[in-house]
Image (cartoon, helix red, strand yellow):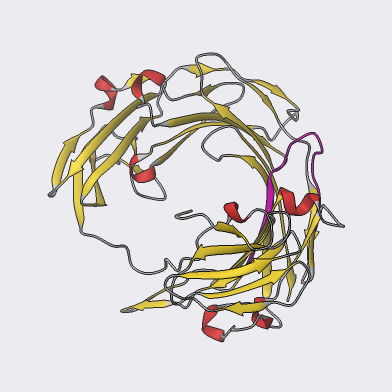
Amino acid sequence: MRLLVGLVVCAAGCDAAKEIVVAASADAVVVVQDGDGPWTQLEVTDGEVRFTSTAGWFGVAWMCPPVVDGVTTYRQPPYVLFETEPEMLWDFVCSVGPPDGEYLTLSGTAPTGTQVFARTIRPTEVDASEVFGLSLPRGVNDVIAYYPAEPARFLRRSIDLQADTELALPIDTDGLVMPVQTPTIIGAPDDGLRLYSDVNTDNSAVYAAFEGTPPTVAVPPLAGLLATDRATVGAQARGCTAQRPVTAEDPTLIIPREMYGGVNRQIAQWNADPEIAWEGVSVHLGFGFGSVVISARQSYLDGSASPESIPIIDVTTLPGWRPELGGPTAGDAIDWYLERYRGEYDGDYNDCWISGSFTW
């Protein structure tokens, strides 16, 4: 999550060197590269790091130690980002650890088969007992109920949870019928097409998703949403997504052409649809219980000698690295995931992804 963007101070005129100031956790190990120069570790002073870029592009890596809470170890993956615009930098924040705040119980009743979305990764599906229970933080929480039986129904509630609370969700009687849309799909394959709709809420960032059965999909009723909610409708095929905000009209969704590429220990390469105004690329390297994330913005790629590739950085070779910060070792099986993207995940959005594996 972006908390505070980088600050640019012109050191020798804004067309020359740029001094970059970014907030950082005291326990973060921050390493930077100006152009293709050497990687250099920065010192975190008074909650920030400073470095100067003269090449017009730079790389940043930040790594965080694990946090142990009883028998649970919380780990944050090392991040490597290639960029040209300091304003696009994230804060170098170590945010691992147990969740903060007091948690309370929200329980209640809803018809069997109802899916209840709150601050959970997956929805809670109400069984034959018609009873559900959620553990949520004290304060205002969004709750969305979805009843998939035709016609699909939608119910949104905002709950100020100050004590253990019981709540009835009579979605079969109070829920709004979800409109059914038939998107026009351009680039749709003969099979393997997935249609979906979803909604994200500002308060507590609840995400609720609803599967369609091509050629139709039920979408969140606009009358049941707050102005800050963001509802979308999308299509996926061949590893690519076309998504647009929900409106009253059936959407037109243009699916990008399939992406090809690969990742090894030195480089990630791809061939993505040139008709899409891509905004960046992200590569996730997974191994055992660890991972590394390497990404680049489009401005960096546009100025690169190889605009459809980024280097894979071995974080274990960076200055300041130590084993508890995480990283692959020789012989590790690496599961990789490469994604090209444009737009915002909760609005007008495209992505394409590919995956594979290799041995480090």
Q: Residue at x 59, y 63 (%)?
A: 20
46 is higher (above) or lower (below) than 150 = below
126 is higher (above) or lower (below) than 234 = below
Q: Is residue 151 visible?
A: no
- The part of the image, by quadrant, that contains residue 80 is bottom right
284 is higher (above) or lower (below) than 133 = below
Work out which residue is located at the far right of the displayed protein and give it: 305
User: Which of 242/226 is in front?
Assistant: 226
Side of 344 where 170 appears, left or right: left
> Is 171 one of the magenta-colored residues?
no
Residue 47 drawn at (x, y percent): 43, 70
How many numbered callouts? 0
- The part of the image, by quadrant, that contains residue 116 is top left
Region rendered in magenta: 269-285
Quarter containing the C terminus = bottom right
User: Which of 100/356 is in front?
Assistant: 100
Q: Is residue 85 visible?
A: yes
Residue 226 drawn at (x, y percent): 35, 27
Q: Residue at x 37, y 69 (%)?
A: 97
User: Which of 187/10 is in front?
Assistant: 10
Residue 194 drawn at (x, y percent): 62, 33
Side of 316 where 204 appears, left or right: left
Residue 43 drawn at (x, y percent): 53, 79
Side of 240 where 292 appears, left or right: left
Q: Residue at x 65, y 53 (%)?
A: 85
Work out which residue is located at the far top of the displayed protein and give it: 249
